[in-house]
Image (spheres, rainbow, N blue to C red):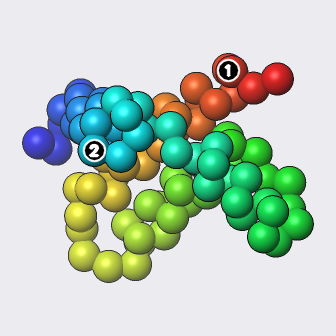
Amino acid sequence: MSDPISMLEEAQSAIAQRGETRDNNEERSMASCVAAFNGMFGHELTEEQGWWFMVLLKMSRSKGGKYNIDDYIDGAAYCALAGESYEVRD
């Protein structure tokens, strides 16, 4: 499963699967996470920035240890979710 198309298909599947188990058929938990973070720490992080944070987390993990395809699949999924957040923001 190392070709890019397969990895993107896995990213699409991961978004759908996580949504089914966590968010009532959607992987859209970042808005509430960012709101809680902002309230706790007094920041003004956006939902899109929250997804970019997760992309950077996956990038950092991919550099810091053994190869794990999950870092790349999740990174692709988080990039897509960041793009969606940008399109729907006010």
Rendered image quadrant of residue 65: bottom left
Residue identifier under label 2: 21
**Viewer-closest of 72 and 46:** 46
Residue drawn at the location 70% of the way across and 48% of the way down: 49
The amino acid pointed to by label 2 is: Thr
User: Which quadrant would the N terminus be assigned to in this image?
Assistant: top left
**Percent x, y for residue 36?**
70, 60
Would residue 4 be visible to someone looking at this image?
Answer: no
Q: Which residue is mark 1?
A: 87
- Observer-side mark, 1 or 2, equals 2
| Circle 2 residues within 10 Å: few <14, some 14–19, many ≥20 | few
Residue 48 x, y percent position in the rendering: 67, 40
Q: Are marks 1 and 2 in contact (CB under 8 Å)?
A: no
Q: Can you tell which quarter of the image residue 18 is in?
A: top left
The residue drawn where x is 27% and y is 56% is 70
The tag on residue 48 is none
Q: Residues within 10 Å of mark 1 (few under 14, many from 20)?
A: few
Residue at 76% across, 45% down: 46
Q: What SS does tag 2 mark? A: helix
* Residue 53 seen in this snapshot: yes
* Looking at the image, residue 67 lies above or below residue 16: below
Real-space CA distance between mark 1 and mark 2, rounded to the nearest whole angstrom: 25 Å
Residue at image coords 51%, 64%: 57
Residue 34, image x and y in percent? Answer: 68, 53
Residue type at the position of mark 1:
Glu
Locate residue 19: give its quadrant: top left
In-image side of 35 versus 52 (left or right): right
Name the side, left or right, on which 37 lies relative to 2. Answer: right
Q: Residue 80 in the image: x percent, y percent?
A: 49, 32
> Could you tell me which secondary element the residue under label 1 belongs to?
helix
Q: Residue furthest front?
A: 24
**Residue 26 falls left or right of residue 9:** right
